Image (spheres, rainbow, N blue to C red):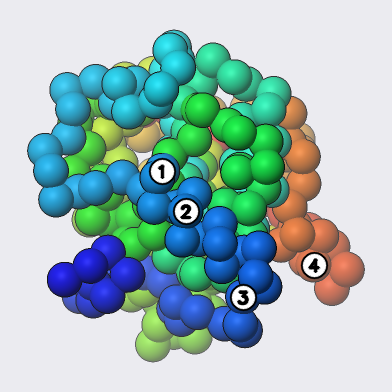
Amino acid sequence: MTEDSAPARRDSFFGRRKGKGLRAGQAEALATTVASLRIDTAVPAPGDLRSLFPRPVEAVALEIGFGGGEHLIHRARTEPAVGRIGVEPFVNGMAKAARAIAAEGFETIRLFDRDAAELLDWMPAASVVLVDLLYPDPWPKTRHFKRRFVNPRNLDRLARVIAPGGLFRFASDIDSYVAWTLAHLDAHPGFRWTARTADDWRQPFPGWPGTRYEAKAIREGRRGTYLTFERV
């Protein structure tokens, strides 16, 4: 079975895998760039994830569900000492990001195009300093709440892979998902909300470039909320 034909796990938290047809350049980037940068969870993880990158990095960060890659690529440009693993099962988003990654020749990005839960289970304990979950699918219908990425099992996964003192950052424009996330993180012993004032969750994270999902929310009259939790 190939990476592309692998079925979704039973605990998958994403929806459709593919949308409209790819442009020629995107298809080529998907076939070449993603193939060269894809993390293979069929082999044991290295003891130190920094060894995944061809150039030396000081730390490793993970972004789950990067969409078109705007934030992932911005951070790679502005924080070159950090190796970044980007997860995006949606083929069109991965193809868009892969084309930009290939154009700039980043050596501090690796990619994963399946369920983030699979990757988290593969990663060594305390191996990353930051996990970003930015404007994830809110699964707004009550019957779909079980598909929200923030849940006790995934928080256990995150607590295992984030080093003590590391951060989990969450952004959303959906108030019910924000409240859901606060409740779940408050109930988990591995995390502490770092906010001290209201501006701490109203203002985007330092160095925030904006994303197309945030721009859509603003156009539709919704405001983003930005939560930071420390791994204790």
Q: In the displayed structure, would residue 57 be above or below residue 102?
A: above
Classed neighbour count for the residue bearing mark 2: other residues with Cα under 10 Å, few (<14), some (14–19), many (≥20): some
Q: Position of residue 21 (x, y in %)?
A: 61, 82
Cα distance between the residues tagged 4 and 3: 22 Å
Classed neighbour count for the residue bearing mark 4: other residues with Cα under 10 Å, few (<14), some (14–19), many (≥20): few
Hey, what amino acid is under mark 3? Leu
Q: Nearer the viewer, mark 2 or mark 4?
A: 2
Q: Nearer the viewer, mark 4 or mark 1?
A: 1
Label 2: which residue? 32
Hey, what amino acid is under mark 4? Lys
Q: Earlier in the sequence, mark 2 or mark 4?
A: 2
The quarter of the rendered structure image containing the C terminus is top left
Hey, what amino acid is under mark 1? Leu
Name the disc covering residue 216, or none: 4
Q: Position of residue 154 (x, y in %)?
A: 28, 53
Q: Earlier in the sequence, mark 1 or mark 2?
A: 2
Classed neighbour count for the residue bearing mark 3: other residues with Cα under 10 Å, few (<14), some (14–19), many (≥20): some
Cα distance between the residues tagged 4 and 1: 30 Å
Label 1: which residue? 37
Q: Is residue 129 visible?
A: no
Give yes or no for contact between labels 4 and 3 (Cβ–Cβ under 8 Å): no
Label 3: which residue? 22
Classed neighbour count for the residue bearing mark 1: other residues with Cα under 10 Å, few (<14), some (14–19), many (≥20): some
Q: In the displayed structure, would residue 127 be above or below residue 151?
A: above
Q: Secondary structure at mark 3?
A: loop
